Image (spheres, grey):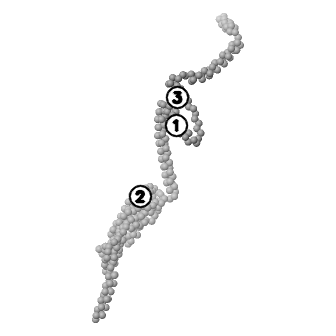
Amino acid sequence: MVEELVATGVVLASAGAVYLMAAARVVKQYERGVVFRLGRLREQVRGPGFTMIVPLVDRLQKVNMQVVTMPVPAQEGITRDNVTVRVDAVVYFKVAAPAEAIVRVEDYRFAVAQMAQTSLRSIIGKSELDDLLSNREKLNQGLELMIDSPAVEWGVTIDRVEIKDVSLPETMKRSMARQAEADRDRRARVINADAEFQASKKLAEAAQQMADTPAALQLRLLQTVTAVAAEKNSTLVLPFPVELLRFLERAQHASGAPQQPVAAPQQPVEAPQQTPPQIAQQPVQEQLPPSEPRLDQDSGGSNSGQG
């Protein structure tokens, strides 16, 4: 009798151990447990830790509550300004309602992936190329709203959406490079013209100042000669300026010096011009006929005219 009781106790203990092993479940910290009893959803969602279910009656399905990073395959489309591009993105989402994520949609990951691809193609068709390249934050917000609208019904919350890369055709890349080069060339020319304009203003002011003080021009010339000759790698031909002579002449007038050294060179120049005509006039006067016959002819002609 005792043996039968011991055997029965061992059997019950074994059955209890098997039952506990079949009913025991462990839910991790980042998971939530959804229980289906005879196919019907239980309202209570099991939290993290140790939990029990009814074997062969309940079925526990775990749902990951972590943020999921899902890359969106590159989608090819035509922008609003008729440019063919390939755009890829990445979606960050997490499950907010575990029961709805299991019941309302068959596979919430696949559903979010397909919705992301469709929304990305729609964003490409509504945007221009400049927006895709420079105004990505606004496009990311629009793409997030497009994906989040149906995902809320599935118990999924879209954390953020980012456009990773925009691939352009090679011809478009070359065109954009030429456009950027032309723009830089234009800006360089404008800057150069502005610099020339400012330099011309300063030069005009300097010329006006030097016109009032001619000695400043000579000093500037000497400074330029000194700067050029300092390198000693070129031959410098310096013409003798006439203004320097005028400056020296004015300086002599101001100091009261005699003017003979300046006027002396003019006398030898005028003397040769006066002597040849005096020498040439003497033989010419000797060859001319006397003046009296001319007077007679004139008088005779006048008498004949009178008669």
Q: Nearer the viewer, mark 3 or mark 2?
A: 3
In terms of secondary structure, where does tag 3 sit?
helix
In the rendered image, residue 173, in percent from the top left (x then y), is placed at 50, 56
Q: Residue at x 66, y 16 (%)?
A: 278
Residue designated by label 3: 247
Label 3, label 1: how many angstroms apart (C-alpha)?
A: 18 Å
Q: Of label 3 and label 1, which has the lower sequence position?
A: 1
Q: Residue at x 32, y 80 (%)?
A: 23
Cβ–Cβ under 8 Å for marks 3 and 1: no
In the rendered image, residue 162, in percent from the top left (x then y), is placed at 41, 61
> On the rendered structure, is 274 left or right of 200?
right
In terms of secondary structure, where does tag 2 sit?
helix
In the rendered image, residue 73, in percent from the top left (x then y), is placed at 45, 65
Q: Of label 2 and label 1, which has the lower sequence position?
A: 2
Residue 89 appears in which quarter of the rendering? Answer: bottom left
Q: Return the residue nearer the eye: 300 or 99.
A: 99
- The kind of residue tagged 3 is Phe
In the rendered image, residue 107, in percent from the top left (x then y), is placed at 38, 71
> On the rendered structure, is 183 left or right of 50?
right
- The kind of residue tagged 1 is Gln
**Could you classify mark 1 by the number of other residues whose Cα lies within 10 Å: few (under 14), some (14-19), or many (20 or more)?**
few
Q: Quadrant of the N terminus?
A: bottom left
Residue designated by label 1: 223
Residue 16 can be seen in this image: yes
Q: Residue at x 30, y 89 (%)?
A: 9
Q: Is residue 24 above or below residue 7?
A: above
- The kind of residue tagged 2 is Arg
Q: Is residue 70 above or below residue 39?
A: above
Most extreme residue toward the bottom is 1
Q: Of label 3 and label 2, which has the lower sequence position?
A: 2
Residue designated by label 2: 136
> On the rendered structure, is 115 left or right of 240?
left
